[in-house]
Amino acid sequence: MIYFDNNATTQIAPEVFEAMRPFLTEFYGNPSSAHTFGRKTRQIVEKSREQVASLVGARFANEIIFTSGGTESNNWGILGTLEANPSKKHIITTRVEHEAVRKLCEKLAGDYEITWLEVNEQGFLDLDELKNSLREETAVVSVMLANNETGILFPVAEIAEIVKANSDAIFHVDGVNAVGKIPINLKETQIDLFSLSGHKFHAPKGIGALYVKENLKLSSFFVGGGQEFSRRAGTEAVHQIAGLGKAAELAQDLLSEPPAVAGGLTPTKRIFALRNKLENEILQKIPASSLNGTTNYAKRLPNTSSISFENTNGEAILARLDDLGICVSTGSACNAENHTASAVLQAMNVPYSAAMGAIRFSLGRYNSEAEVDFMLGNLPKIIEELRRIAL
């Protein structure tokens, strides 16, 4: 199998699995228990909290609150802010957010006024539109750091400054698809809330965190015991937390690791180089193919390419690649009933004929150049055949 779908989920790193193992077998105590056996598991919870805090550049470890993943973190960040500020009835977000934010805001539209920020054809925001949308009754602004489909990076540190200079709103960032791929230093920003999910950077599914800036007023999402500094009730999933901590440690090492040999590449630069080879050769070899987003590498995740193939169907491309053991994602949410393009590509005004033939390639640390070459050796033939059938 060749796996080019790392923005959907990632393989658990072997080191992460080994870090989890003792807390599934030997050390099963409740971290809230006062006895020595419980304190053993409490130690790994707090060590993991420090590891995650270090990865995202939090000032204090207790700003990291463990959750079940990105969806909970995003929902809690927004709903907790609204509950803590009941007099404010205005939310600002973007047209290209992940469903965990976008669908929540759609649901809230009956009780709150939602301002939807538009993006241009490259997927970028107009920061003047953001500034002009802020007002006294704005409760929360929620903007993602990295788009999960296109990899486009939003300047969230700059956005935080705009929000704080022009309102009293809380600024929430969905950082789920950015953590582990690019350096993050929250203490140098005015970001209030930041969501992350472990399975996007080689930790297990079902574990994530919400960064809550010190002294920020945020209503609890779950009611119960006093776990997670009385912010998030429920017995901690120690084995999951241990895995998240180890994955955070590995990710930080990869982001800062020097080349193994003179002239070599760091792991993140190797992924970047593989992505660029795959992207550039697809665009050169396959007629009527186009990149969704920007060619400015500094404004896009180093592992992600969204490429449209005119007059083909993304689901058909995915199926042909799947037959060859290659895993990718479509850039469209097309289905047999309505054949609609993804909300992200619609917001970018990608033409229907291109949006319905969009494929997302997202590479990771375990991909190889041989896998890229195999893809490049087969994809042009697949596209040619599908276009011929469609005539």
Image (cartoon, grey):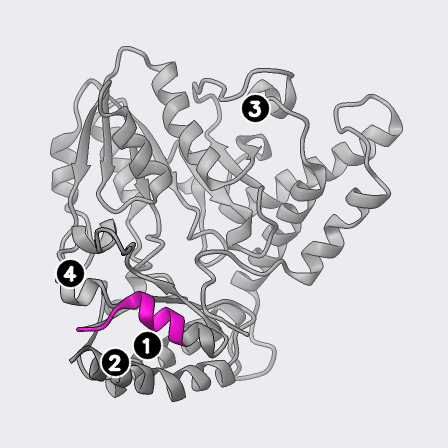
Neighbour tally class for label 4: few under 14, some 14-19, many 20 plus, Cα within 10 Å: many
Please report the residue visible at 12 percent of the width from the left and 39 percent of the height from the top. 129
Determine the secondary structure under disc 4: loop
Please report the residue visible at 80 percent of the width from the left and 23 percent of the height from the top. 33
Neighbour tally class for label 2: few under 14, some 14-19, many 20 plus, Cα within 10 Å: some
Up the image or down, 148 lies above or below 106; here it is: below
Please report the residue visible at 29 percent of the width from the left and 38 percent of the height from the top. 102
* Cβ–Cβ under 8 Å for marks 1 and 2: yes
Determine the secondary structure under disc 3: loop
Disc assigned to residue 232: 3
The stretch of residues the image draws in magenta is: 311-320
Please report the residue visible at 37 percent of the width from the left and 81 percent of the height from the top. 277
Up the image or down, 268 lies above or below 160; here it is: below
The location of residue 342, given as percent across then percent down, is 25, 53
Determine the secondary structure under disc 1: helix
Residue type, numbered disc 2: Leu
The location of residue 260, given as percent across then percent down, is 61, 77
The location of residue 160, given as percent across then percent down, is 30, 37
Quadrant, the C terminus: bottom left
Which label sits in the foreground, 4 or 1? Answer: 4
* Cβ–Cβ under 8 Å for marks 3 and 4: no
Residue type, numbered disc 1: Glu
If you read the primary sequence from the N terminus, does the residue marked by circle 3 or circle 4 appear first? Answer: 3
Return the residue found at the far top.
87
State which quadrant residue 24 falls in: top right
Disc assigned to residue 283: 2
Q: Is residue 208 left or right of residue 313?
A: right
Up the image or down, 388 lies above or below 312; here it is: below
Q: Is residue 306 visible?
A: no
Residue of label 1? 279
